[in-house]
Amino acid sequence: MREMEEMQIALEKFIKRSHRIKCNLKAELEEIGIRESEVTEARDIFEQKIVIEGVDSLTQRIPAEKFLRYMEEWLRSAESTIEKMRLRTSTLKSMFTKLSNQLIQKEELGEAIDAVDFDQLRIENQHLAEKIEQKNTHLLELKRMNGTANLVLSTNKKYLQKQVQDLSTVKNNIKFQEQKIIELDKESYDVEKEVAKVKQKYEEIVDLRENYKVPDTLEYIRTKAELEDLKKSVKMWERKNHIQQFALNTSIRKMKALTGIKKPRPSWFEFREMEKEESWLSLFDNDLHYEDAKSNTYSRQSYNI
């Protein structure tokens, strides 16, 4: 009899454990089905909006702005779903707490509760705990997906920033090349002008060469003889000029020594030859009178002041 009771108890435990395992597997299958449907739906939406409709007709590429906008909208939707799941989990926790409190109250009041009620409450509690665990697992999965999406978004933002920098570099390079083209055009215009001038000079030289006439031999000899005579005359006048300059410097030094004046006077150059001593003395007297007149004039000006 005792063995039958033990077997009955073991059988009941096995049935409960099997039922729990069955419920867990069923919940996992439901979760896998939900995940599969969500992934399939997200993939279809992504392919429709980004891969098919998002391709640019000119570049045949997917613009980064559309991809980033889609990812941001998807992240907002995921955050909204996470918030809903969080609220649902909170509701289930509150229900579990309420039922637990009711059970405690019944035990405290001493009401008669059958074993079936305890089993039913335990099973419901277990189901609720499993649902809470499933929701927490799903919430963690959504958080993981959110983190992955944020990582992808950050990578795409960096790529977009690099593309913007490359675009700015290309624009600056285009401006530099355009400025260089303008400078080259101006330089080409200047070179063309120089070529035209050189061409004109070349044509003049060619014309002069073609129309050049050799002078007569006698005329050439006569012109050369005149040139030699002119050269001799220039040398002779240069020697005379040197002698006259030397005589002038000597005369100026003598006048400075006689008059005691450091700077030459214009009156010194009015006489070219001074052979008599009276001329030198008269010139000296004139300089003295000039100095006296200058001093008298200065005195009168001082008096007038």
Image (spheres, grey):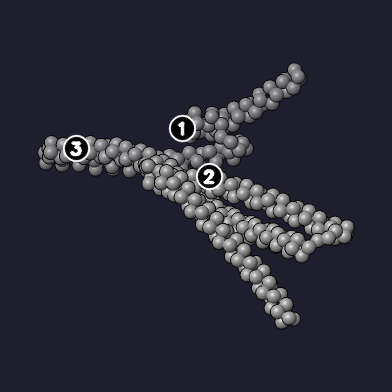
Q: Is residue 83 above or below residue 201?
A: below
Give the farthest residue toward the top.
304
Q: Secondary structure at mark 3?
A: helix
Could you say which disc has been placed on residue 203 in the image?
Answer: 3
Q: Which amino acid is tagged 1?
A: Arg
- Which residue, given by chain and number where applicable, does mark 2 sit on? 69
Which residue is pictured at 37% across the width and 42% down the height? 58
Q: How far apart in space, not on screen, are marks 2 and 1 (Cα)?
A: 108 Å
Picture layout, residue 15 above or below residue 142: below
Residue 184 placed where, x, y %? 35, 42
User: Where does the image place residue 81, in percent across and percent down from the top left?
Assistant: 61, 49
Which of these two is toward me, 96 or 69?
96
Q: State if disc 3 and disc 1 touch (CB < 8 Å).
A: no
Residue at image x 72%, y 20%? 300
Tell me the crowding category of disc 3: few under 14, some 14 to 19, or many 20 or more residues within 10 angstroms, Cα based. Answer: few
Comparing 264 with 196, the one in front is: 196
Viewer-nearest of discs 1 and 3: 3
Q: Which residue is mark 1?
A: 272
